Amino acid sequence: MSTLRLGIPKGSLQDATVQLFAKAGWRISINSRSYFPGVDDPEIECMLVRAQEMARYVETGALDAGITGRDWVSETGADVAEIGELLYSKQSLAAVRWVLAVPEDGPIQSVKDLEGKVIATEVVNLTKKYLARHNVSARVEFSWGATEVKVPQLADAIVEVTETGSSLRANRLRIVDTVLESRTVFIANRAAISDSWKSEKISNLRFLEKRENFQSRSPADRGHRRVYQGRHHAQCSQGKSRRSACSASGAEKSDGVHAKRSRMDCREHDCGRKHCAHHHSAFESGGRAGDCRISAQ
């Protein structure tokens, strides 16, 4: 059986990613002692990889696809295909920022004041590119962690990632400038997307992107747009709730009965997680997995 090797980000994005897959209909179970999570899809093999390393492994083909930050794709310079943007991060839907920060009572007011100074950061390449854009020469040192505590004793400034800025304020640091804004992205190996089977499987996983983009819209906007629920979609022209059946909608019907929008799989047609004509019309509201009206006739 063909399988898709999928990288799940280990660390701060791990829980949010598992929740995102659950909303889209894939259940990922993680054992704290294993780097190979289970998933209820025999065509997917998951591996936990740090977001910082994901793009490199996807580029080399060790992984067919993965989820990471656009910042780490830029930092590593990996040649990968960006399949879509996922509107979530560790704490919110907002983009994360890599910021230049200095002691709040220090003399540094702009990047120009860092000429000849020392900057500590985890994103050395991004920081060097930022300094080059501003024609500033400074020494950039890699930080293995706890970057906020390194100024002013060990460095004159830091470039650190933040969503809310609370950690920087707690360490009495002041933001001077934003180096880069980044969001979570779904990336794929270029050879993998050239393979017909893997390309189709990766396209199916784009429902993660559709689902999260849908969740980020306002309730009023959601009702009149295409609704993505798990791996299936329906169009309700009357603006009904996505959680209730809409008799006025012509999107999903089986013998005139509106079908329930659900994540349940159609087991009677052996279609797995692929779409088929029966798959979208099999389940009535209140039905259960395996109750397929088409096959029962």
Image (cartoon, grey):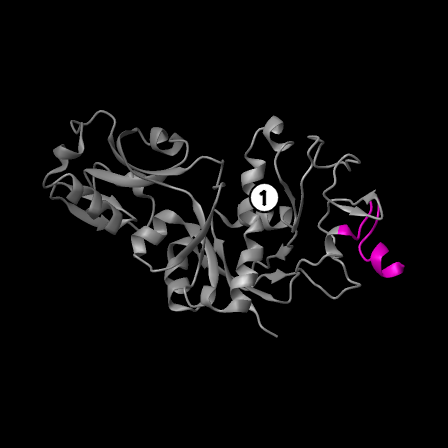
Decide: is 273 above or below 16.
Answer: below
Residue 33, can we see it? no
> Would you say residue 114 sits in the magenta stretch?
no
The residue sitting at 56% across, 49% down in the picture is 208
> Which residue position holds label 1?
211
The residue sitting at 77% across, 44% down in the picture is 260
Decide: is 167 above or below 51.
Answer: above
Q: Which residues are magenta?
A: 281-297
The answer to which image quadrant residue 54 occupies is bottom left
- Could you tell me residue 19's position as x and y percent? 59, 46
Give the quarter of the figure containing the N terminus. Answer: bottom right
Give the quarter of the figure containing the C terminus. Answer: bottom right
Q: Residue furthest right?
A: 297
- Relative to residue 40, is residue 185 drawn left or right? left
Report the number of numbered marks: 1
Which of 44/146 is in front? Answer: 44
Residue 114, can we see it? yes
Q: Residue furthest bottom?
A: 1
- Could you tell me residue 29's position as x and y percent? 63, 57
- Could you tell me residue 200's position as x and y percent? 55, 62
- Could you tell me residue 13's position as x and y percent? 49, 47
Q: Amino acid at mark 1?
A: Arg
The residue sitting at 25% across, 40% down in the picture is 158
> Would you say residue 284 sits in the magenta stretch?
yes
Q: Main secondary structure of the magenta part?
A: loop
- Relative to residue 235, is residue 100 drawn left or right? left
The residue sitting at 51% across, 63% down in the picture is 199
Q: What is the crowding at mark 1: few (fewer than 14 residues within 10 Å), some, or many (at least 20)? A: many
Which of 165/43 is in front? Answer: 43
Circle 1 — which element?
helix
Q: Residue furthest top?
A: 105
